[in-house]
Image (spheres, rainbow, N blue to C red):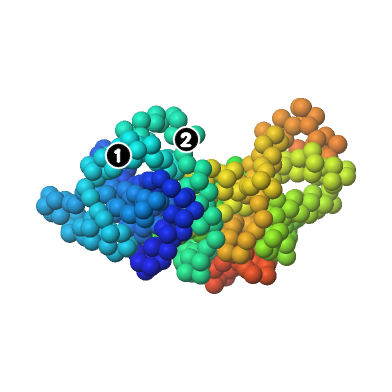
Amino acid sequence: MLFDKQTYEARRATLRQQVGSGLILLPGNSDTPVNYPSNVYKFRQDSTFLYYFGLQREDLAAVIDADSGEEWIFGDDIDIDDIVWFGQVESVAEMAAACGVAKSAPMGQLSALVAKALACKRQIHFLPPYRHDWMIRLADLTGIRPEEQKARASKALIMAVIGQRAKKSAAEVEEIERACAIGYDMHTTAMRLCRPGVTEQHIGGVLSGIASSRGCIVSFPPIVTMHGEIMHGNPSPCPLEEGRLMLCDAGAETNENYCSDHTRTSPIGGRFSQRQREIYSIVEECHDYVLQLARPGVKWWDVHFAVCRMMTERLKELGLMRGNTDDALEAGAHAMFMPHGLGHMMGMDVHDMEGLGQTLVGFDDEVRPRLDQFGTCSLRFGRRLQEGFVLSDEPGIYFIPALIDAWKAEGRCAEFLNFTLLEKYKDFGGIRIEDDILVTADGCRFLGTQQIPYHAGDVENFMANN
């Protein structure tokens, strides 16, 4: 376990208090087969289960009685056949005691506990399940069909978990910085390999190897592509081509499953062209502008649109946009170039707690998502910042040929976009620069003790000397 027993006990005590009454059911994850039952992906524990119990073994579940304070860990002890193949592990009772849980029982007894609570008309609090094995098990336990479970998940439990996990403790920040250190090695290696003839797939594979050798796994499949205009472009067998850009978006998880997430865009061949440098400098300026704006009490929604305002002004200087900036932002014209939000929360999930409901994680009654506009509907976070929040800072500019053609055919935002000039950028690709930031008492700072080069001159110098 990453933290001491008292840390997990305190987290669960807070959770009980906030939920108030009923049974809180928190399942862990099971092994996931790749292509047949005994060939499985590397095990990854459920993040919320890990947050409250710290136990890394598969096939466990926990129950907290919010009324009485009783707690159980359910799971089956391994038998001699398992020991032969996988080695000895602690008993379920020993694991429960290690995280401060007094009671343990075989998994088969979970159904009796839940059934008794339901018979007494008590509420069973559960989070939206995201794995089908638990959807089926939850249906068996509660009678709630899988397709109904997301809607019937406990709002009280969801909000309590979000409230706790959103603010990172000093120890959690240290762990995220360990992930950032792995990310530094991943991205500087990608920059060293960024030369004509090397394939995207080779670089992506090397990055995954670094993440696995230094920590647990990658925090998401690496994005390594010459087609930076594709938001989630998977590495292909294509060799890198002189004069193009390589966008690399990759992160790592520590052995305790805290994440990093960085993006760098590198010139293949080592030097930016004049046109590339012009666009890159805008993204670079927007990226750094976040550090001036983000602080406790400021709405991230406002930070996002302040960055979009700066981007629009700079694109107007290049002739790619025109007209009144306020009107352009209101119309969503800037989303032609940046169709995503400025950033997302981070922690044990690279998009932290997204499975609990993105609008609940990123928005509240004061700042509501706008779902009726392209680009703005993709914002993952908008509410007021608090000390201890960890977010990504990831502005980007993309030239998406199909989007250019569609908007041109519609005449969409024509008063703000220079479609004639945009035609000449269809072969450009995309640029994104991303770092992880911590909101501090009086501002924010980048996470990680080593900064991956991102200023245009620093990128060129690093590539020339490494």
Helix, strand or loop status at disc 2: helix
User: Which residue of the protein is positioned furthest toward the left in this rendering?
Assistant: 80
User: Which residue of the protein is positioned furthest toward the bottom in this rendering?
Assistant: 449
- Of the residues shown, which amino acid type is indicated by label 1? Lys
User: Which residue of the protein is positioned furthest toward the right in this rendering?
Assistant: 324
Q: Dividing the picture into quarters, in which one does residue 215 lie?
A: bottom left
The reply to whether residue 117 is in sight is yes
- Check residue 441 in the rendering and tell me which mark sits there, or answer none: none
The reply to whether residue 254 is in sight is no
- The residue that appears at 74% across and 32% down in the rendered structure is 407
- Check residue 116 in the rendering and tell me which mark sits there, or answer none: 1
- The image position of residue 426, as x and y in percent, is 70, 40
Frontmost of labels 2 and 1 is 1
- For the residues labelled 2 and 1, the Cα–Cα distance comes to 20 Å
Among the two numbered marks 2 and 1 on one chain, the one whose residue lies closer to the N terminus: 1
- Of the residues shown, which amino acid type is indicated by label 2? Arg
- The residue that appears at 32% across and 62% down in the rendered structure is 99
Depth order, front residue of 453/244: 453
For disc 1, the neighbor class at 10 Å (few under 14, some 14 to 19, many from 20) is few
Q: Point out the image quarter for the N terminus.
A: bottom left
- The residue that appears at 58% across and 60% down in the rendered structure is 389
Q: Is residue 322 above or below residue 99?
A: above
The reply, left or right, for residue 43 in relation to residue 344 is left
- The image position of residue 344, as x and y in percent, is 59, 52
Mark 2, residue position: 152
Q: Point out the image quarter for the C terminus.
A: bottom right
Q: Is residue 412 above or below residue 225?
A: above
- The image position of residue 365, as x and y in percent, is 66, 46
Depth order, front residue of 405/365: 365
- The image position of residue 139, as x and y in percent, is 35, 32
Depth order, front residue of 72/42: 72
- The residue that appears at 51% across and 43% down in the rendered structure is 155
